Amino acid sequence: MDLAFLNPLYEHPGPWASVYVDTSRHAEDTPEQLHVAADSAARELGELGADEATWRAVLNAIEDLRHSPDQYGRALFARAGTIVADPSLARPPQGAYQVVWAPLPRVAPLLDLAGEDPVAIVAYVDRKGADFELRSALGRQKAGAVVGRQWPIRRTKTADWSEKHFQLKVENTWEHNAAEIADALSVCEEEVQADLLILVGDVRERREVHERLPKRLHDRVVESSHGTGSRLLDEDVEQIRAEYVRRRVEAELDRFRAARAPDDEGRVRAVEGVPELVEAGRMHRLEELLIRSDGPDLQQEVWVGEDPDQLAMHRTELKILGEQHSWPARADDALLRCAVATDATALSLAPVAAALAEDEPAGGMGAILRWK
């Protein structure tokens, strides 16, 4: 998950209100449910110590969701009476809402609720052209179309020379249209930064388009067995997207496991355990965090200062380093703040949690390191 969108959260000091709201219940009483959630969340923030301006900002933000609720939910991060960030979620949170008041924004749940949401372009291909659809957790929308040569399209069965010549023209038409579709699909991929390209159509039509795509896209292509003109159901697309995420997480987990072994220069490029992760964060060596949301180490208390790289296992360590102001924080949120500040990424292990073995990151949290 690219964490750059979280940068605004670390441009201001805390404390922070972090609220996750479920908007997935699309029923007649959904506005009333959101009204109740808004009142309850605001009251709970007040009881936790939030200032009135901040809990009122949260109250108003949730009330506004009554008029145009997101499909799954929204995360709200507020301080000093201002909503600083409000990303939409790709999956609903547990319960109607979750509230946290803490020195740092509670961003770790975003890895499961908003991370790894691959954008897919579904291309419905036939011999005359193609229609493109953009699919993500937020739904579907049209993404363009290609109209190729319309004649000649169909072959004949005779062996006459003139008919063979005609069939050659048909072949040329198919190849020309496949090339046009591939070019348009490549442009569309660049424009929307798609993660997946799903080709739907007859076997030959899919294969000809696939072969004409740039090599850089070949490993992102999935061919569907649905026939010409069929429309992929939401569950079909979700299954393909989920499989893509699972493969990506497995690949990163394998990379982490391999990085545990020293390289040719004797450097280990993977760490686990909160003390080692804190040290790596302080030294700006985090390349990618791997986090299992139910890992026991995530809640471990660390100490943070005003800057993202000011963190330690004990408050006295920060004082020795010259930091005058410090606060206790959860290890996962403190390390994610470090990751954001150093352009590192983070990945939830939830898609492979059921199959995790003993060689997963100890305590549910590890990191692949960068070395200069």
Image (tube, rainbow, N blue to C red):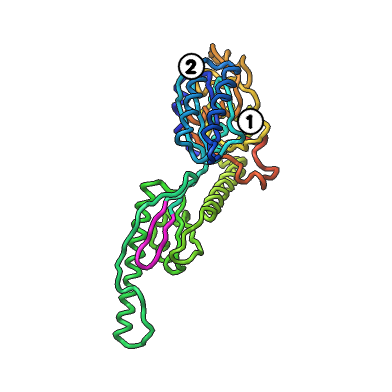
Numbered mark located on residue 53 in the image: 2
What kind of secondary structure does the magenta stretch mostly adopt? strand
Identify which amino acid the numbered label 1 is placed on. Answer: Leu
- The residue where tag 1 is placed is 298
Q: CA distance from mark 1 to mark 2?
A: 30 Å
Rendered view: 145 above or below 354: below
Q: Tally the marks.
A: 2
Kind of element beneath mark 1: helix
Bounds of the magenta segment: 122-133
> From this viewpoint, is residue 62 visible?
yes
Circle 2 packing at 10 Å, graded few (<14), some (14-19), many (20+), is some
Residue nearest the viewer, comparing 229 with 113: 229
Circle 1 packing at 10 Å, graded few (<14), some (14-19), many (20+), is many
Rendered view: 260 above or below 214: above
Identify which amino acid the numbered label 2 is placed on. Answer: Ala
At 57% from the left and 17% from the top, the residue drawn is: 46
